[in-house]
Amino acid sequence: MKKLIAGNWKMNGSLAANAALLQGILPGVTAQACDVAVCVPAVYLAQGQALLADSPLALGAQDLSARESGAYTGEISAAMLRDFGVRYAIVGHSERRQYHGETDAVVAEKAQRALAAGITPIVCIGETLAEREAGSTEDVVKRQLAAVIHLNGHCISEIVVAYEPVWAIGTGKTATPEQAQAVHAVLRAQLQAASTQADRIRILYGGSMNATNAASLLAQADIDGGLIGGASLKAADFLSIIDAAS
Ligand code: 13P
């Protein structure tokens, strides 16, 4: 299947820095065999929409509200994201689970809101170091994914899953291709039990993926792309990862 390389800029950037970064990336994404997206901070969606118009680079958001509309100060709805041409929205990133108390149930609701608005949710799941060391990696990721399947079973083939081991995020410690593939295979089996179309659901790997390790990770049978943090902020590195996926 066509791989997806998505950059997660997190809380980085400025109008000037974003323009420079996109100017560095865009000339390199003309005829890629993979899909490419950048998930930008919400205040820069308008800038992203303008700079990415008519380009093969899709615009993504990093979060959205679990509510449809109304008195939810500070929140941004799926419909608002649609207004700015957003195609993907990250939901349930471990940083939101950790620092903003997002539960499995809230993450599932956010995925549902995205799907209802025609936005592809990139649902993030992954275990902490303590959970891995306790031997509960499989239980944790299956529990996290089960909540999303439970609420969205009828359209589960429309989601993207991102396996991001928390201990590998921003640490330079990547899961080995074998470690990542082992978890991806578990997730694939869980999706297959829920959907006859599970084989077309993209399961991305995220966590210190970079220009050097991308090819070996992307060569694994069930790794269908990457969710890239730090390395998506450097045009040359991001383009190398895109090349590895093409
Ligand atoms: P890094 O690539 O910086 O480790 O971040 C991964 C990530 O959290 C992407 O969502």
Image (cartoon, rainbow, N blue to C red):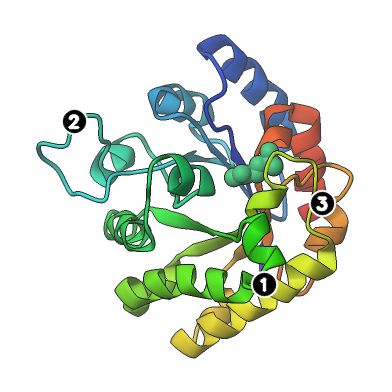
Quadrant hosting residue 120? bottom left
Amino acid type, residue under disc 3 in the picture: Ala
Question: Element under label 1?
Answer: helix
Marks 3 and 1, how far apart at CA = 16 Å
The residue furthest top is: 16
Amino acid type, residue under disc 2 in the picture: Thr
Front position among marks 2 and 3: 2
Determine which residue is flagged by label 3: 214
**Residue drawn at (40%, 29%) of the image:** 42
In the rendered view, does 182 fall on the left or right side of 40? right
Question: Element under label 3?
Answer: helix
Chain-order first, disc 1 or disc 2: 2
Q: Can residue 195 be seen from the camera position used here? A: no
- Return the mark for residue 184: 1
Front position among marks 3 and 1: 1
- Name the quarter where the N terminus is drawn: bottom right
User: Tags 3 and 1 in contact by the CB under 8 Å rule?
Assistant: no
Query: From the viewer's perspective, is residue 218 above or below residue 90?
Result: below
Query: From the viewer's perspective, is residue 86 above or below residue 236?
Result: below
Q: Can residue 62 be seen from the camera position used here? A: yes
Q: Ligand 1 is found in which quarter of the picture?
A: top right
Number of marks drawn: 3
Determine which residue is flagged by label 2: 73
Q: Front-most of 149 and 87?
A: 149
